[in-house]
Image (tube, rainbow, N blue to C red):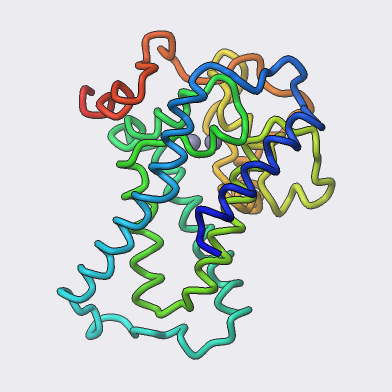
Amino acid sequence: MVYAVWLFWISLAFVFAERLCPWRKNQPLLRPRILSDLVYLVFNAEYLGILIALAAQRLLSIYNPEPFITRNLMADKPKWLQFLILLIVFDFLQWCVHNALHRIPFLWRFHKVHHSIVDMDWLGDWRFHWGEIFVYRSVLYMPAVIFGFAPAVLFSYGILNTVIGHYAHANLRLRLGPLKYLLNSPQMHIWHHNHPDSGPINRNFGITLSLWDWLFRTAYMPANPPLHLGFEGIETYPKSLPGQWLAPFRG
Ligand SMILES: [Zn+2]
Ligand SMILES: [Zn+2]
């Protein structure tokens, strides 16, 4: 089954789950910016990923890194081990990249698009600037291709990332119990999006695993959600999709 079909069914499941078990009761299904977020979903989930994967393969056919690293190191390893390495090593890399997106002013300009969400739901997972995907994907796709991870393993990892990404952004009451120390969740990720008015910032950088935040003391998870989401100056931040795509280049 192609990724788009998985994405459709996973998204539909979260639409129903949010209606059945909402955490913040007064959040409507048809919230502001839903249409532009649907465009983000289609563009970011499908087309950009394919373009970057093709670019990574092309680059590797021109530039052969073999003298410096062992190519296809993972190709003969069992699939469960490949999956485990992806889950732990790649997620840690994503955690580091996410930290950089917040702490390096030039990268924060791009990541601000994701933090412009004020009505958080599963769809918010997909609102991010295409420039940001180049940073994330080049850190992940290049080693994945070089080390020869099986396409089926990469695909399964992508599906798990999608499910946890939807879940972490969803307006869902569903709590994880002790698993909160391992996996990202709505109760944790919403505090990553809080406005500086509402509490501490630069917490909860986890993408799929929350483990890194607990280990490196960036975890923050009070019982209730923050009062406001966003960042300093969000009132004047562009709301349209073209405006958000151009915003990082305007300084
Ligand atoms: Zn962030
Ligand atoms: Zn987010």
Q: Position of residue 193 (x, y in %)?
A: 56, 28
Q: Position of residue 179 (x, y in %)?
A: 78, 52
The image quadrant where one finds ligand 2 is top right
55 up-or-down from 191: above or below: below
Residue 237 position by quadrant:
top left
Q: Quadrant of the N terminus?
A: bottom right
Q: Residue at x 59, y 21 (%)?
A: 119
Which one is nearer the viewer's eye here, 230 or 152? 152
Q: Position of residue 32 (x, y in %)?
A: 53, 16
Extreme residue toward the left, this view: 62
Which one is nearer the viewer's eye here, 121 or 111? 121
Extreme residue toward the right, this view: 177
Q: Residue at x 52, y 66 (%)?
A: 155
33 up-or-down from 42: above or below: above
Q: How many marks?
A: 0
Q: Position of residue 123 (x, y in %)?
A: 56, 34
Which one is nearer the viewer's eye here, 46 or 63? 46
Q: Quadrant of the C terminus?
A: top left
